[in-house]
């Protein structure tokens, strides 16, 4: 309980600080944006209902039906009022009302473990929405505070990887519109896929009355929390903006994906105050890797879906020009490092976990440093730096797989709901003990003992079989 309270206070403090910073730049922060959706038109109805779905994992089926009915009823009322006032139409207020109502119910009508369980569920649902709002605020801050971007550095370093964004962009152009249509859905619905995997992992919370120690939603939220901080350190807008038509007058040239950028001495380039600097690392790659990892414990269909979403997301990020290949390598290392840290925080730190986190942090820092300070050398020697980049990334992947396998072998057997171990009584222990053969007794003593058996006063009397 103390840990959850400390985490809640830290999260609230972070949101307040982000709200203050956002206000300083002239726009509202995550607290204001989420609070206004209690009454005003929400930005994303599916996101709010996704938060409600996470909250409902702690409810019984009857309570879930009631919660959904109330949410739908409230949304119908809001839609009718907005239609009468000719206001912007959207849904989701009802879902937010129900989540907040569950929080009030947990504080006022529940006690003990039931209160903690309900508050965890509502906190998880609210964090999903707050995480999205926090990410939007971070992106606005990056566009306002980072006047220049480092795309020429990453583009030069990407020569060591054979410029995968340019290759993927040409491939999608050649296979459009089928490939682009499918990949747009895969890229845009990554949060939905993650929510489905998370709900699958949390499907037994209502029965077991406890959350699993570690699940996908935890890592997903932490990646979204810390990832944008790296954007502030290494601002990059992506090839479709820095070298493509989407960059407008701010693009260095309109050459993506038809012509490779020249290898010159890279310099920071100025860019507009609107486009987010959200490329390094690729958080879509990090989320897709995390989704893939957590889908390994599911059914065969879920494992195939996790693989499909990972491959589709990587192809989309490169083919649409949203990221460089170097971004993806950093995203993989970032994801596995965060995932290992979250797993160890839940199950306990061991030597393998510490090694993975230390190795991942070191490799991640080395990747960013090499992109910033060695891009020209990397472009001049692709035969050396290309395999080296893949090797260090593969080292982190291999270390993670070994650590995860070790943690899985050491994990305790899952508890069966409703089943309790039967304590071994003293009598049962004695009955299970081997019985020594009695020594030969004197015939007279044996006869006397036989006569005494069954008498009312005998202490060793045995019941007769009827």
Image (cartoon, rainbow, N blue to C red):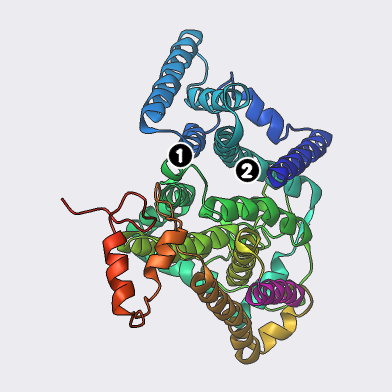
Residue extending furthest toward the top: 84
Q: Which mark is residue 57?
A: 1
**Disc 2, SS:** helix
Q: Nearer the viewer, residue 226 or 170?
A: 226
**Where residue 200 appears, x then y in whole percent?**
41, 50
Residue that protrudes farthest toward the right in the picture: 24
Q: Is residue 222 left or right of residue 62?
A: right
Q: Which residues are magenta?
A: 350-370
Numbered badge on residue 131: 2
Image point 69% across, 73% down: which residue?
354
The answer to which image quadrant residue 69 occupies is: top left
Towards the viewer: 331 or 443:
443
Q: Earlier in the sequence, mark 1 or mark 2?
A: 1
How many numbered marks does the figure carry?
A: 2
Q: Rate crowding at label 2 as few (under 14), some (14 to 19) or many (20 or more) other CA atoms within 10 Å.
A: some
Tell which tag, 1 or 2, sits nearer the viewer.
1
Residue sitting at x 73%, y 81%: 376
Q: From the viewer's perspective, is residue 323 above or below residue 136?
A: below
- In the displayed structure, 434 sits above or below 140; it is below
* Residue 423: % across, % down: 46, 56
Label 1, secondary structure: give it. helix
Residue 357 falls within the magenta-colored stretch: yes
Residue 285 versus residue 55 in the image, above or below? below
Q: Position of residue 81 (x, y in %)?
A: 48, 10
Q: Locate residue 324: give its quadrant.
A: bottom right
Which one is in front, 316 or 298? 298
Residue 453 figure quarter: bottom left
- Give coordinates of residue 275: x percent, y percent: 67, 48
Circle on res. 130: none
Q: Residue drawn 69% across and 35% down?
A: 30
Chief SS of the magenta region: helix
Q: Quadrant of the N terminus?
A: top right
């Amino acid at each position: 309980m103390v840990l959850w309270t400390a985490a809640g206070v830290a999260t609230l403090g972070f949101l307040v600080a982000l709200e203050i910073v956002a206000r300083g730049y002239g726009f509202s922060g995550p607290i204001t944006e989420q609070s206004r959706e209690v009454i005003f038109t929400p930005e994303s109805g599916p996101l709010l209902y996704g938060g409600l779905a996470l909250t409902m994992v702690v409810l019984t089926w009857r309570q879930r039906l009631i919660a959904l009915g109330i949410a739908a009823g409230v949304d119908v009322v809001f839609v009718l009022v907005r239609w009468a006032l000719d206001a912007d139409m959207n849904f989701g207020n009802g879902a937010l009302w129900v989540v907040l109502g569950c929080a009030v119910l947990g504080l006022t009508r529940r006690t003990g473990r039931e209160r903690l369980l309900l508050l965890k569920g509502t906190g998880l649902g609210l964090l999903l929405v707050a995480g999205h709002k926090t990410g939007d605020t971070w992106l606005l801050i990056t566009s306002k505070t980072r006047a220049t971007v480092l795309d020429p550095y990453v583009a030069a370093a990407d020569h060591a990887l054979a410029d995968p964004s340019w290759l993927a962009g040409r491939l999608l152009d050649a296979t459009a519109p089928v490939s682009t249509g499918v990949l747009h859905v895969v890229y845009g619905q990554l949060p939905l896929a993650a929510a489905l995997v998370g709900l699958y992992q949390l499907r037994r919370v209502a029965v077991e009355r406890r959350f699993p120690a570690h699940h996908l939603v935890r890592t997903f939220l932490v990646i979204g929390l810390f990832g944008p901080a790296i954007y502030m350190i290494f601002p990059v807008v992506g090839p479709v903006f820095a070298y493509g038509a989407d960059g407008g007058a701010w693009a260095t040239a309109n050459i993506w994906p038809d012509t490779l950028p020249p290898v010159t001495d890279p310099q920071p380039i100025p860019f507009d105050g609107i486009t987010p600097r959200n490329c390094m690392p690729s958080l879509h790659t990090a989320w897709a890797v995390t989704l893939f990892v957590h889908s390994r414990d599911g059914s065969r269909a879920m494992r195939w879906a996790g693989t499909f979403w990972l491959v589709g997301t990587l192809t989309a990020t490169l083919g649409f020009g949203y990221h460089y290949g170097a971004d993806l390598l950093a995203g993989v290392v970032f994801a596995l490092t965060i995932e290992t840290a979250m797993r160890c925080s839940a199950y306990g730190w061991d030597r393998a976990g510490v090694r993975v986190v230390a190795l991942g942090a070191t490799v991640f820092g080395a990747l960013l440093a090499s992109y910033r300070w060695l891009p020209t050398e990397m472009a001049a020697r692709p035969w050396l730096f290309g395999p080296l980049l893949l090797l260090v990334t593969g080292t982190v992947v291999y270390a993670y797989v070994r650590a995860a396998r070790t943690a899985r072998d050491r994990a305790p057997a899952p508890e069966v709901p409703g089943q309790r171990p039967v304590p071994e009584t003293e009598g049962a222990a004695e009955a299970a003990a081997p019985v020594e053969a009695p020594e030969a007794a004197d015939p007279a003593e044996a006869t006397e003992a036989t006569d005494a058996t069954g008498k009312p006063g005998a202490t060793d009397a045995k019941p007769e079989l009827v």
